[in-house]
Amino acid sequence: MWRKGAGGAPAGLVGQTDSFHGTARHLRWSKKMTGAYSNEEEERLDIIEEQLVEKKTPFFLMMKMYAEFLHDCIHEKRFNQITDSKGLNVVAEYLKQAIAFLGSNNSDELRKPGRLELWALFRRFEDKQPALASLSRCAVCCFYEEAGWDPDTSESVTPIPFYLFLLKRLDPDMGLEFLEYAGRYLLDSAPG
């Protein structure tokens, strides 16, 4: 369902700009990553995307799932080894806002300041604390407009491959865990 570009990166990401992703020049490979996704991740991703499309899962639920996954990882101290707790706490607070506001009236307006702050955090720490910058970039995805994903103009039918790509920049070993979480959250408990 999704397409790969040069070097295994999701097509349309490296060096391009669009309204959802912003400038994608920052999408660099982690030193531990040798390709975008493992074969198992690719297979699981295809299955999840197919089922999400079938169920017509709304974009805001995918954003909320990603926010809750990231927040849970911070709360469980999964990222404490790679960045300081002060930075993690800042990102966690923004993720709590996203979780609280997604799906509510005026959600886009309520979350817009968080998106701007997380982008600023990303830029400020990109060179000094790349792990915190990567986490901030992941969190930015939870702050876009609820109607922001258009499968007709995107390289993928859902944002899940992009979420996975960014997450693997932070921790290349979290891919399958994230996909299992996404499947449980969006498919097992979703009505339909």
Image (tube, helix red, strand yellow):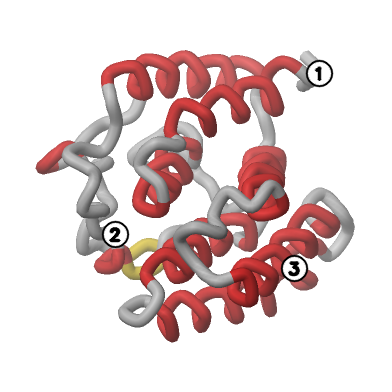
Amino acid type for the residue under numbered disc 3: Glu
Q: Which circle's residue, 1 or 3, is located before the other in the chain? A: 3
How dense is the environment of label 1, judged by Cα within 10 Å: few (below 14), some, or many (20 and up)? few
Marker disc for residue 93? 3
Element assignment for label 2: loop
Element assignment for label 3: helix
Marker disc for residue 27? 2
Element assignment for label 1: loop
Quarter of the image holding residue 185?
Answer: top right
How many marks are shown on the rendered structure?
Answer: 3
Residue at 50%, 44% in the rendered image:
150
Side of 50 where 30 appears, left or right: left
Residue at 29%, 67% in the rendered image:
26
Amino acid type for the residue under numbered disc 2: Leu
How dense is the environment of label 2, judged by Cα within 10 Å: few (below 14), some, or many (20 and up)? some
Label 1–label 3 contact, CB within 8 A: no
Q: Position of residue 13 (x, y in %)?
A: 28, 52
Label 2–label 1 contact, CB within 8 A: no
Residue closest to the far right: 105
Q: Is 8 drawn above or below residue 25 in the view shown?
A: above
Q: Closer to the camera, 153 or 128? A: 128
Q: Position of residue 71 (x, y in %)?
A: 69, 52
Q: Which circle's residue, 2 or 3, is located before the other in the chain? A: 2
Q: Is residue 24 visible?
A: yes
Q: Which circle's residue, 2 or 1, is located before the other in the chain? A: 2
Q: Position of residue 35 (x, y in %)?
A: 20, 37
Q: Closer to the camera, 43 or 4? A: 43
Side of 144 where 17 appears, left or right: left
Mark 2–mark 3 distance (CA, rounded to whole Å): 24 Å
Residue closest to the far left: 6
